Amino acid sequence: MAMDERKFRILQAIIDDYILTAVPVGSRTISKKYGMSLSSATIRNEMSDLEELGYLDQPHVSAGRVPSAKAYRLYVDQLLETGRLSQEDEHLVRAHFAGRTRQMEDVIDHAAQVLSSLTRYTAVVLPPTGSQPRIRNIQLVSVSDNAALVVIVTDAGVVKDAVIRVSEELDSDALYSISRSLTAELSGSTLTEAVERIPLLMERMRAQAELIEGIGDVMQQRGEDIRPHVAIGGTANMLSYPEYSDMEKARSFLNLMETRDRLADIIGQNGEMSFTVRIGPETGVPEMEDCSIVTMTYTAGNGQQGTIGVIGPTRMQYSEVLAAVSMMGRQLSQLLSTSEDDGVPRLEG
Amino acid sequence: MAMDERKFRILQAIIDDYILTAVPVGSRTISKKYGMSLSSATIRNEMSDLEELGYLDQPHVSAGRVPSAKAYRLYVDQLLETGRLSQEDEHLVRAHFAGRTRQMEDVIDHAAQVLSSLTRYTAVVLPPTGSQPRIRNIQLVSVSDNAALVVIVTDAGVVKDAVIRVSEELDSDALYSISRSLTAELSGSTLTEAVERIPLLMERMRAQAELIEGIGDVMQQRGEDIRPHVAIGGTANMLSYPEYSDMEKARSFLNLMETRDRLADIIGQNGEMSFTVRIGPETGVPEMEDCSIVTMTYTAGNGQQGTIGVIGPTRMQYSEVLAAVSMMGRQLSQLLSTSEDDGVPRLEG
DNA sequence: GTTAGCACTCATTCAAGGTGAGTGCTAATC
DNA sequence: GATTAGCACTCACCTTGAATGAGTGCTAAC
């Protein structure tokens, strides 16, 4: 038995209804509400087949059917193929971001906010990160007698600041001159390159060896765990969906949202695709077994790439979410660069 | 009728029990569990008095009594007076923060994390902010042909970065030299001072007037809405308390946690006190009518002050929370400076 | 002033029964 | 051979009502 046209239409109807109501849908509903000229009995037979094919699940014997992850996959693929994504709220969003200057973090936060309120799900935005940012400038600022704050500015605009503690005394002037020579030495190199040159510099500037070693540590740390500022919007939204009326689930979800490192990993895992939809188990995250994640890569001016994503129940309004994510991705790309490419993302499964 | 010794002891017992169980406590419980040699009837009479005095509420006629905000106030004041705050986990926390260097944001985030897991409530940490940070360095980094990223480093170590868009073309070298002269001009002044000098600079460097105006805008924006990075830990914790089993309440709470600006306002409102406890309505936040907030001010090396706080149900374990907050405040103060003052906060109502 | 006793209130729990949406199967119909 | 009507059956869910028990206020006795 294979999937034919009629089965497909029935499946579509079931998914539509379930997305709307979150309630298992029965044969009668389909036969009546969705204008099929088929009796419920026929639908029942088809549903039974669809279940056997793995597209439907049945919570218990006398409940209606519920679409499986496989069904959503089919549905979404279909959606992506036809590619009919509306773009209504586009001007609304553009208005939101009006104004000439913006702090990077603000843009990210704002985007997450807007995206979540647009979709009524949870939105996550990762800032653009390049392969290897290059150092532009190193600044040391005195904090107390034996602690200094180091600020490393890179061309990614991503700035690291950390407090370094040393045993010797540090005065402001000394710090300033060290800043200058470090900048002269390391400007232009990547963080890893800079780390490699640290021992050399330590030798050359013995008096400040401890301080320089500290700076090396900071670079190393940052180079390893790139921990960008993750913006999240609308975590509370999830609580309004019946699938999270179970407190335990809600809590584990919120916990996940709180561990930003992990969240960044999850969202960032979109391979080479500019557009991905991961459904239920496809997310690879146990806590997200009945969530779906829609992500899109956006590109900032200097070619650096960031990711935006929406997390919702598997039963999410895919077509709206796809439209919103795609639109927001374009907007962000445009906002963060002025090199006007078409900005339209490839739609790939 | 006034508050006497016995009434006070009964009230104390009621609060203790309610903090533990979150269930309205009846006269019999007090008479039996709390070793009073009084019958339940007597307790009942006293409870009736206490209710009249405003220390107890009764959810409905045949339920036990629940402590009012006024009661908690009394309880906390008592606690603060005796000042017996344990400091068990102190070494555990210190271990957490071991290591020489730390990015400021990390410290803040980490502190919120630790504080929330220590108390099992929600923790909020505001980074140290001074009265008026002074500019140390201004860096321009090219992003695309007609957009630049400006990074402003201040002695607070707080760094502003924003993208500025201009119509003219900007090359890297030009940006670098502008950076240098701007730094020379503005280093040492506060943001507001710098803003005032912008028109002058625009005149002096006509060619870059547009760019400089943009930088002025950024400074202005930042000067006005100082929007520090607010660290939050353990929002999900709140869901485990019965007072938040109501989804609607949980959602409104989470929403509040998400609007960081507002949250920063709420937490930051601790006046001159280094230590404050706001109970229920005292928070002044409608959504927090049955929350309490314990905050403490900590001081970084350069005299800048930040705030840490714990948000929990009014029925929170005050004595533990007070201890944890006070300890974490000391730790942060110590960590962010090495000027070893005693670090012990004044305990004030 | 304290306590025992009693009538009363009211949230909570539990079982029983009814309801209705849904299914699978079979036999009749197109 | 596909479709449909009909029927028996299942099972979550709601309602109802009774039992339970924790709690109170009041009164009278100690």
Image (spheres, coloured by chain):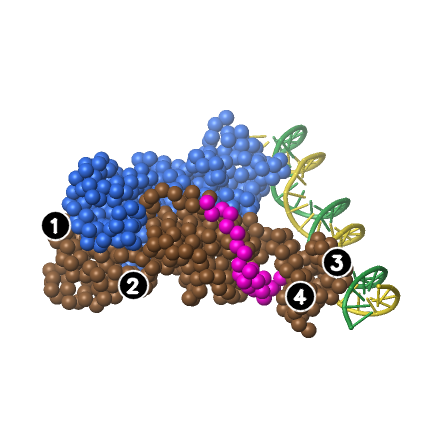
Chain colours: A brown, B blue, C yellow, D green
Give A228 or B337, whichever is nearer the viewer: A228
- What's the amino acid at mark 3? Ser
Q: Is residue A170 left or right of residue A56?
A: left
Q: CA distance from mark 2 to mark 4?
A: 50 Å
Image quarter for residue A269? bottom left
Give A136 or A79, whichever is nearer the viewer: A79
Q: Which region shows up in magenta?
A: A66-91
Q: Is residue A81 magenta?
A: yes
Q: Are marks 1 and 2 on the same chain?
A: yes
User: What numbered label is drawn on residue A132?
Assistant: 2
Q: CA distance from mark 1 to mark 2?
A: 31 Å
Give the mark nearer the N terminus: 3 vs 1: 3
Q: Are there few (<14), some (14-19), or many (20+) residues within 10 Å of tag 4?
A: few
The residue under label 1 is A173
Q: Are marks 1 and 4 on the same chain?
A: yes
Say which residue appears at 34% left-offset and 50% top-offset. Answer: A104
Q: Are marks 1 and 2 in contact (CB under 8 Å)?
A: no
- What's the amino acid at mark 1? Asp
Q: Secondary structure at mark 4?
A: helix
Which percent across, then down, holds residue B51? Answer: 53, 32
The residue under label 4 is A5
The subunit carrying tag 3 is A
Question: Is any part of residue B130 visible from this angle?
Answer: no
Q: Please name which of the two marks, 1 or 2, marks the residue nearer to the observer.
A: 2
Which percent across, then down, holds residue B242? Answer: 54, 47
The subunit carrying tag 4 is A
Say which residue appears at 44% left-offset and 62% top-offset. Answer: A274
Q: Using the image, determine if residue C24 lies above or below residue B227.
A: below
Q: Please name which of the two marks, 2 or 4, marks the residue nearer to the observer.
A: 4
Give the mark nearer the N terminus: 2 vs 4: 4
Q: Please name which of the two marks, 3 or 1, marks the residue nearer to the observer.
A: 3
